[in-house]
Image: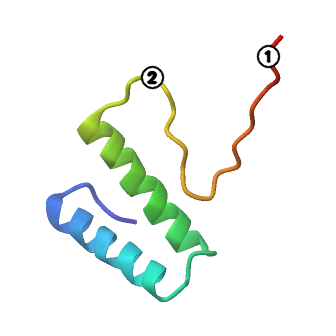
Amino acid sequence: MYEQDENAEHEAMTRLFDLTRNGETDNCEYSQLDSMIYGRLEQAYGSDGAAAPRPGAVQVQTAAA
């Protein structure tokens, strides 16, 4: 849907912002854009191995043994 060039990334970010501002966060386009942008942020800034909580994600904690 969106290529990984700088202009397409800017357009994707702008579209995600528009969808969020309009409250249109429960659809496939929003999910795809969110996933793509999150992945690019991980590529750009790396990861320390611990998965950061995603917005709207369900957090599960297990009991210590």
Proximity of marks 1 and 2: CB atoms separated by less than 8 Å: no
Residue 34 position within the rendered picture, expressed as x and y whole percent measured from the top left: 46, 61
Q: Mark 2 highlights which residue?
A: 49
Q: Using the numbered discs, state the Cα–Cα distance from disc 1 to disc 2 in whole angstroms.
A: 21 Å
Classify mark 2: residues with Cα within 10 Å, few (<14), some (14-19) or many (20+).
few
Q: Quadrant of residue 16?
A: bottom left
Under mark 1, the amino acid is Ala
Residue drawn at x 59%, y 70% as measured from the top left: 28
Give me the residue at 70% from left, 49% from top: 58
Which quarter of the picture shows residue 9?
bottom left
Seen from the viewer's position, the closer of residues 47 and 30 is 47
Q: In the figure, 29 relative to 3: above or below?
A: below
Is 40 displayed left or right of 25 in the figure?
Answer: left
Whether residue 33 sits left or right of residue 61 in the image: it is left
Q: Residue at x 47, y 54 (%)?
A: 35
Closer-to-camera residue (25/9): 25
Observer-nearest residue: 44 or 28?
44
Quarter that holds the C terminus: top right
Give the x, y percent position of residue 24: 55, 83
The residue positioned 34% from the left and 64% from the top of the image is 2
Q: Quadrant for residue 14, please give it.
A: bottom left
Q: Is residue 59 above or below residue 15?
A: above
Q: Comparing marks 1 and 2, which lies closer to the viewer?
A: 1
Mark carried by residue 35: none
Query: Label 1 crowding class (10 Å Cα cut-off): few <14, some 14-19, many 20+?
Result: few
Q: Amino acid at mark 2?
A: Gly
The x and y percentages for residue 42 are 35, 40
- Residue 64 is labelled as 1
